[in-house]
Image (cartoon, helix red, strand yellow):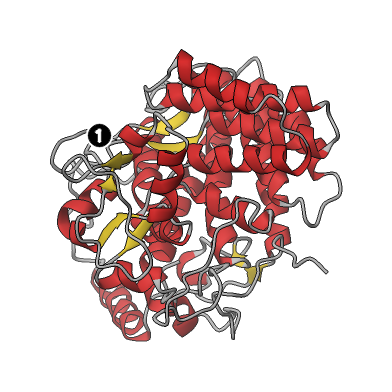
Amino acid sequence: MKNIKFKFIGVLILAVLVLGSCKKWIDTGINVNPDAPTDVPMSSLLPAIQANMAYNLQGGNDLTRVTSIWMQYFQGVGRQSQGEANYIWHDGDVDNLWNTTYATVMNDLVILTNKAVTSNNKTFMGISDVLMALSLGPITDVFGDIPYTEAFQGMSNLNPAFNSQQEIYDTIISRLNHAIVCLSDPKAVIIHGDIMYGGDPSLWLKAAYGLKARYILHTCKVNTNAYTDALAAVKQSLTDVSEDLSFQFYDGSGYQNPFYQFMIQRGGDMTMHKTFTDMLILRVDPRLHVFVSPVDTIWDGADWGSTGENASTPGPAVNSGSSAVPFFTYAECLFIKAECEYKTLAPDADVRTDLVNGLKASLNQYGVYSDAYVAAYEAATSTFTGDALYKEVMVQKYIALYDQLESYNDWRRTDNAIGLKANPTSAAQETEIPRRFPYSLGEKSYNSNTPKNVTIIDRVWWDKKAK
């Protein structure tokens, strides 16, 4: 969250004293701007929160672009992106992510929640719970312990305590459970202002169940019931690609996808990575044409240490002005279901069915569905069992969740089931792929409660190291 510097605090105190002494003769309404209301209705607050989440958090360049380089979707070949590919990622690099998530996204969600509770609006209550879970989740997943119970108090508490990640996860599940209750209530009706689901509580209810499954699944290393509980939740989630929870950007100045804006401004810094591009080519995957843009009809990702010359760039699925930012998708639901079935010893045929259905959902999501490809894939995997079947589930999920944080979470919690290799060059500052972000420089400077001596190869709570 944004911490206010001591110098600013002094100025603020002086201003309060001056205004206090002058209030007898100054008209307090003289500088009120009627076009800047101090009390924003929920129907106006919600779309701003959704847009900020899509731009700064779920699709933010300071989060998903970095983890996508580490997950080898992209290769950094210049400036900051090259540094990130070499595992150079410092406390000052995450200030923007930390500050915007706390001071803008989650602070506004606290306001929305309070308004919803005051008005007893079940739909807004449920939506604010889902979105808070979707804000706490990514931040705790990359930082670990974070402030929550003492956060959002403004000047009254500039040094909030950090909650353990386990406590944050309890909060995430609690908020999602509360959302499920609210959105199931007969008083939950369609509301105005929701630009993601049109205010439909039944769709938000399905998303809440799916996200509950996702976050329970994250704890599979520390929770023996994770697969069983996640499977029960995901069965009540999305049932079609049309129900994907995503934010649609608009290809107009000021409304464009954040990654597209980055590529326009610093496109020479990043290309496709050879690992992911080769995987798509080898599989003759129809998504190659939307995930990757060729150079002179050549599909070629940059390898380690490459300058990126003549390498392919990210395709229109993520790199166009109007590219949508997925928050949660039907494809992810099906891959969660397939993995949980496998881990709870369901018949291999059931796992393979959901594996194929997950592929279908992803192809439909990106508009490249092919009956011939699906039939060939189904035949090729019809005999998969054991470790080979599990790895294929995780590889297909990795492909489907292109440029999403969830791939990074999967890589950690499955101990690299997909088999990525770390950057082997001498330029790499670590010998392994980073497992977390450092804490914000601003937070470390102004909040004495910030955990110390954290490195990017340390593990977060749920990423328990196997004995």
Q: Is residue 58 visible?
A: no
Quarter placement of the N terminus = bottom left
Q: Is residue 337 visible?
A: yes
Question: Residue 17: which quarter of the image?
Answer: bottom left
Q: Residue 140, position in %: x, y?
A: 59, 60
**Is 142 left or right of 217, judged from the image as shown?**
left
Q: Is residue 7 above or below residue 120?
A: below
Q: Is residue 17 above or below residue 68?
A: below
Question: Residue 146: which quarter of the image?
Answer: bottom right
Residue at mark 1: 322
Instruction: Give the residue displayed 54% in from the left and 45% down from the top.
Output: 134
**Nearest to the observer: residue 293 or residue 438:** 293
Q: Residue 248, position in %: x, y?
A: 33, 32
**Nearest to the observer: residue 46 or residue 270:** 270
Q: Is residue 124 above or below residue 425?
A: above
Q: Amino acid at mark 1?
A: Ser
Q: Residue 164, position in %: x, y?
A: 69, 66
Residue neighbourhood size for the residue with mark 1, other residues' Cα within 10 Å, grouped as few (<14), some (14–19), many (≥20): many
Quarter placement of the C terminus = bottom right
Q: Secondary structure at mark 1?
A: loop
Q: Residue 385, position in %: x, y?
A: 76, 34
